[in-house]
C-alpha cells in the first residue's frame, strides 16, 4: 500500500549511503488478542485532527489500509542501520503506553493467527482514502491478503540509471532466499497452513484479477530505468486502466512485485520480509540483507550473470522457501552456480554458508543466531504449537510474542 502525506522530502543519494526501514504492527486487545481498529488514536496533528502520518523525531508513524495496523518508519534516510533496532523499540514502547488506557497493545509477526477478516476488517476511513477505496472496489480488501499481512520494507537508494540497473539486478537475485530467513506467518485463523510464509502466498495471489500488477513476484530483469518503465510499469498501467478510469492507482507503488522502484524518492523497496518478534531481529535481518546486496553489488557476482537469471525459476525458488522455510531445497542450478553453492542445498544451510563467508556483514552469525541455528520464526512457532494447535495455546504463545516485542528480545527456541 502507498504511504500518503510524506513528512519529509526524500533526498536523492548514492547507493548504500542511506537506508529506509518500515515496520508494520497490529493493534490488539491485551487480553483476548482480538484486533482493535484504533490506529486513529495514534495519528493526530497538533490540532487534534486525524492524519495519515505524524513525525516522531527520527521516525514517523503512519496508517495503512486497515484501521488495526500502524506503520513505524524512518523519517527520511537513516545514515546507518546499527542503532535503528533500539530506536524502533523506543517507539513501540511509546505506542504501547498510549494504547494501554484502551486495553490495547502492539502485536508482532506477519499475520494475526486468529483474525477473521470477513468479520473484523475495518478500512482506514480518513484522509486520502480514495486510494484504499479504489483497491477495495477492484479487488475486495476483506481478506487475509489485504488486512492481515505485516511486513518489513527495506528501501535502498540509487542516484542514477547505472546504479539503478546494477542495484535492481542484485536485489532480484537475493529475493528468492529471503523467506528462508524471515518467514513468520505459519498460522491462519487457528490452523497451521503448511506454509512458513503464508503472508507471501497471499501476496502472490491477492491481485490475480490484474496479474500484471505482481507478475511472477520476482521482477523481470531490466537494463535501464526506461526499460523498467517499458517492461514493468507500462503493461501494469494498461492492465489497470479499465478498472481505474480516474487513474487513482497509476503510480509506481501499484507494482506488487517482491521489490519495486519508488522513483519519487529514487529507491528500490524490498517488500517481502515478514515482520519478526522484535525490532532488534527485524534490523538484524535488514543489516544482513543489505550487506548481502552490497557484497554482490560490489562485484562478488558478475552483473551479466545476475541479469541472465530466469524470473520464473527464481520465483519457483522463492515460493519453495516461502512454503518450507529454512528446509527448502535450492533447486535452480543457475542461481546456485552464481552464488557458488551446491544445487539442492537447504536454504538455511545457504544462509549459514553466506554468513561464514562474511557476505552478511560483521557479526551476522551472532545477531542472526535465532534464525541461523533454529530456523525461521515460523518454524520456532510451530515447534512450540505443534501441527494441530488449539486456540488457548495460540493465544498463550502470541502473548509471549507480544512480550518479546515489548522487551525487544527473541522468542526462545
Image (tube, rainbow, N blue to C red):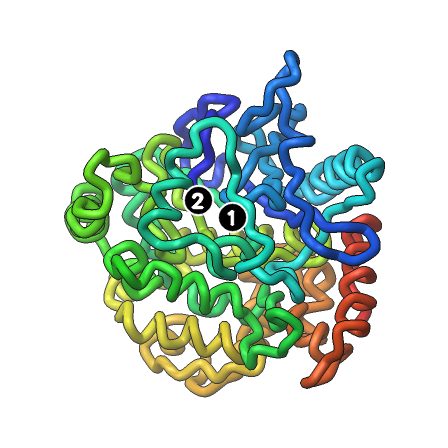
Q: Which mark is residue 1?
A: 2
Q: Is residue 367 left or right of residue 168?
A: right
Q: Is residue 130 visible?
A: yes
Can you identify the residue that label 1 sits on? 153
Front one among 123 and 86: 123
Is 56 left, or right, of 221 in this rendering?
Answer: right
Residue 396 coordinates in the image, percent (x, y): 82, 67
**As displayed, is residue 247 above or below residue 400?**
above
Report the residue at 64% width, 37% height from top.
Answer: 39
Q: Is residue 69 above or below residue 337?
A: above
Whichever of callouts 1 and 2 sits on the residue coming sooner in the sequence is 2
Label 2: which secondary element: loop
- Residue 303 visible (yes or no): no
User: Picture quarter containing residue 380?
Assistant: bottom right
Quadrant placement of the N terminus: top left
Whole-percent x, y for residue 15 in the image: 42, 40
Q: Residue furthest front?
A: 119
| CA distance separating discs 1 and 2 | 11 Å
Amino acid at each position: 500500500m502507498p504511504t500518503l502525506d510524506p513528512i519529509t522530502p526524500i533526498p536523492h543519494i548514492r547507493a548504500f549511503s542511506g537506508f529506509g526501514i518500515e515496520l508494520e504492527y497490529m493493534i490488539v486487545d491485551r487480553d483476548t488478542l482480538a484486533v482493535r481498529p484504533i490506529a486513529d488514536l495514534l495519528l493526530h496533528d497538533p490540532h487534534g485532527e486525524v492524519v495519515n502520518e505524524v513525525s516522531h523525531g527520527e521516525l514517523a508513524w503512519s496508517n495503512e489500509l486497515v484501521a488495526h495496523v500502524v506503520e513505524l518508519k524512518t523519517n527520511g534516510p537513516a545514515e546507518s542501520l546499527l542503532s535503528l533496532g533500539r530506536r524502533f523499540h523506543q517507539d513501540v514502547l511509546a505506542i504501547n503506553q498510549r494504547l494501554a488506557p484502551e486495553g490495547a497493545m502492539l502485536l508482532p509477526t506477519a499475520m494475526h493467527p486468529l483474525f477473521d477478516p470477513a468479520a473484523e476488517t475495518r478500512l482506514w476511513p480518513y484522509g486520502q482514502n480514495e486510494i484504499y477505496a479504489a483497491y477495495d472496489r477492484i479487488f475486495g480488501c476483506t481478506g487475509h491478503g489485504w488486512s492481515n499481512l505485516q511486513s518489513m520494507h527495506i528501501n535502498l537508494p540509487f542516484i542514477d540509471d547505472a546504479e539503478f540497473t546494477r542495484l535492481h539486478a542484485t536485489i532480484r537475485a537475493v529475493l528468492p532466499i529471503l523467506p528462508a530467513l524471515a518467514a513468520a506467518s505459519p498460522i491462519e485463523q487457528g490452523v497451521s497452513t503448511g506454509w512458513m510464509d503464508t503472508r507471501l502466498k497471499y501476496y502472490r495471489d491477492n491481485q490475480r484479477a490484474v496479474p500484471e500488477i505482481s507478475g511472477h513476484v520476482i521482477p523481470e530483469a531490466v537494463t535501464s530505468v526506461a526499460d523498467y518503465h517499458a517492461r514493468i510499469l507500462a503493461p501494469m498501467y494498461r492492465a489497470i486502466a479499465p478498472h481505474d478510469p480516474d487513474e487513482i492507482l497509476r503510480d509506481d507503488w501499484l507494482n506488487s512485485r517482491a521489490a519495486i522502484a519508488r522513483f519519487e524518492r529514487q529507491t528500490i523497496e524490498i517488500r517481502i520480509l515478514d515482520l519478526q518478534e522484535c525490532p532488534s531481529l527485524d534490523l538484524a535481518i535488514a543489516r544482513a540483507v543489505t550487506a548481502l546486496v552490497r557484497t554482490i553489488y560490489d562485484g562478488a557476482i558478475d552483473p551479466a550473470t545476475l541479469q541472465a537469471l530466469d524470473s520464473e525459476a527464481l520465483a519457483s525458488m522463492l515460493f519453495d522457501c516461502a512454503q518450507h522455510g529454512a528446509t527448502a531445497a535450492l533447486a535452480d542450478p543457475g542461481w546456485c552456480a552464481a552464488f557458488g553453492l551446491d544445487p539442492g542445498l537447504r536454504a538455511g544451510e545457504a544462509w549459514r554458508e553466506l554468513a561464514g563467508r562474511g557476505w552478511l556483514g560483521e557479526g551476522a552469525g551472532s545477531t542472526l543466531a535465532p534464525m541461523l541455528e533454529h530456523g525461521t520464526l515460523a518454524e520456532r512457532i510451530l515447534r512450540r504449537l505443534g501441527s494441530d494447535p488449539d486456540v488457548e495455546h495460540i493465544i498463550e504463545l502470541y502473548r509471549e510474542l507480544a512480550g518479546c516485542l515489548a522487551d525487544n528480545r527473541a522468542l526462545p527456541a
